[in-house]
């Protein structure tokens, strides 16, 4: 009877470990957004002058980062 209990415990631990590894791998993959610059001040310009500044968005994570929309402030 003791060997059946030990075998049951080993199988249960193995299954729990297998499930944790399988689902844990999916949860570890995530994007991580990083903005090296979050603010920009334009110098004074003449009226009707077009000014442009590019903000860099970096993904420091290990899954694809999707930028769905951008909003100006």
Image (cartoon, rainbow, N blue to C red):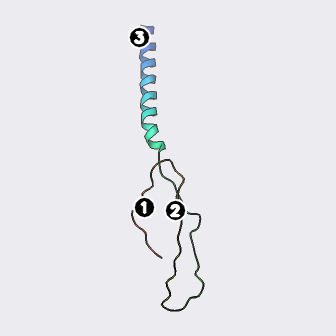
Q: Residue furthest front?
A: 49
As helix, strand or loop, the secondary structure at mark 2 comes to loop
Q: Residue furthest bottom?
A: 47
* 5 and 15: which is toward the camera: 15
Residue hosting label 1: 67
**Mark toward the viewer: 3 or 2:** 2
Measured as percent of width and height from the top left, residue 4 is found at 41, 10
Residue hosting label 2: 57
Residue at coordinates 54% horizontally, 91% vertically from top-left?
A: 46
As helix, strand or loop, the secondary structure at mark 1 comes to loop
Residue at coordinates 47% horizontally, 45% vertically from top-left?
A: 29
Residue at coordinates 43% horizontally, 28% vertically from top-left?
A: 18
Left or right of 45: which side holds 11? left
Please report whichever mark, 1 or 2, sits nearer to the chain's N-terminal start. Answer: 2
* 9 and 16: which is toward the camera: 16
* Count of marks overlaid on the render: 3
The mark found on residue 4 in the picture is 3
Q: Badge 3 local density, few (<14 within 10 Å), some, or many (20+)?
A: few
Measured as percent of width and height from the top left, residue 72 is found at 46, 75
Q: Quadrant of residue 26?
A: top left
Measured as percent of width and height from the top left, residue 61 is found at 52, 50
13 is higher (above) or lower (below) than 48: above
**Mark toward the viewer: 1 or 3:** 1
Q: Mark 1 near mark 2, Cβ–Cβ under 8 Å?
A: yes
Mark 1 and mark 3: Cα distance apart in space: 54 Å
The mark found on residue 58 in the picture is none
Q: Mark 1 near mark 3, Cβ–Cβ under 8 Å?
A: no
Residue at coordinates 45% horizontally, 55% vertically from top-left?
A: 65
Please report whichever mark, 3 or 2, sits nearer to the chain's N-terminal start. Answer: 3
């Amino acid at each position: 009877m003791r060997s059946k209990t030990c075998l049951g415990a080993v199988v249960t631990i193995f299954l729990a470990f297998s499930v944790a590894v399988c689902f844990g791998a999916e949860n570890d993959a995530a994007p991580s957004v990083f903005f090296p610059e979050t603010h920009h001040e334009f110098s004074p310009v003449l009226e009707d002058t077009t000014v442009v500044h590019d903000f860099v968005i970096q993904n420091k994570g290990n899954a694809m980062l999707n930028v769905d929309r951008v909003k100006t402030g």
